[in-house]
Amino acid sequence: MPILEAFNEDKFQLVMSQPLMEELHLVWNRPRLRERINPNIANQLEQQLQYRAIWIELETVPPNCRDPKDLAVLATAIDGQAEIIVSGDDDLRADDQLRTVMATYGIRLLGVHSFLNVIAA
């Protein structure tokens, strides 16, 4: 996992909030992913995030977006003063109006490949 390797090499800092951790836990427990990800590895990753991520409390009401489940991602990025949101969610990244609004906070929306190119530069 290239992003995990970059995180372990301190090539970027991760901003997290409790709602994001809860969503991550739900995603890791989906049957499709449980077949592909060893539960012990998922637990280790959660523990790493608990200790190494920058944890914030959400205060911001984020801008509207197409999927209400993405609101916690946006609020976490804004309150954590993130520079980049990395997402495989095409709906989130393809929303030009949202990209413009997030740019006013100094936040870019990138896919995994684009993010890896940014941190490799």
Image (spheres, rainbow, N blue to C red):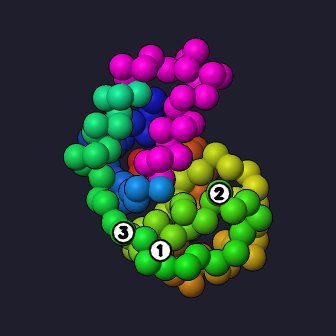
**As shown in the figure, which amino acid type bears the numbered disc 1?**
Ile
Q: Quadrant of residue 45?
A: top left
Which residue is the site of mark 3?
57
Q: Position of residue 95 (x, y in %)?
A: 76, 66
Q: For the point 40% across and 59% down, which residue is it?
A: 17
Front-most of residues 91 and 2: 91
Horizontal side of 74 relative to 95 (left or right) equals: left
Which residue is the site of mark 1?
78
Front label number (1 vs 3):
3
Q: Residue furthest left?
A: 51
Q: Position of residue 24 (x, y in %)?
A: 50, 42
Which residue is the site of mark 2?
69
Q: Chief secondary structure of the magenta span?
A: helix
Screen quadrant of the N terminus: top left
Residue at disc 1, secondary structure: helix
Horizontal side of 18 relative to 54 (left or right) equals: right
Dot 3 crowding, Cα within 10 Å, few <14, some 14–19, many 20+: few
Residue 44 higher or lower than 72, as above or below: above
Q: Position of residue 72 (x, y in %)?
A: 54, 63
**As shown in the figure, which amino acid type bears the numbered disc 3?**
Glu
First of labels 2, 1 by sequence position? 2
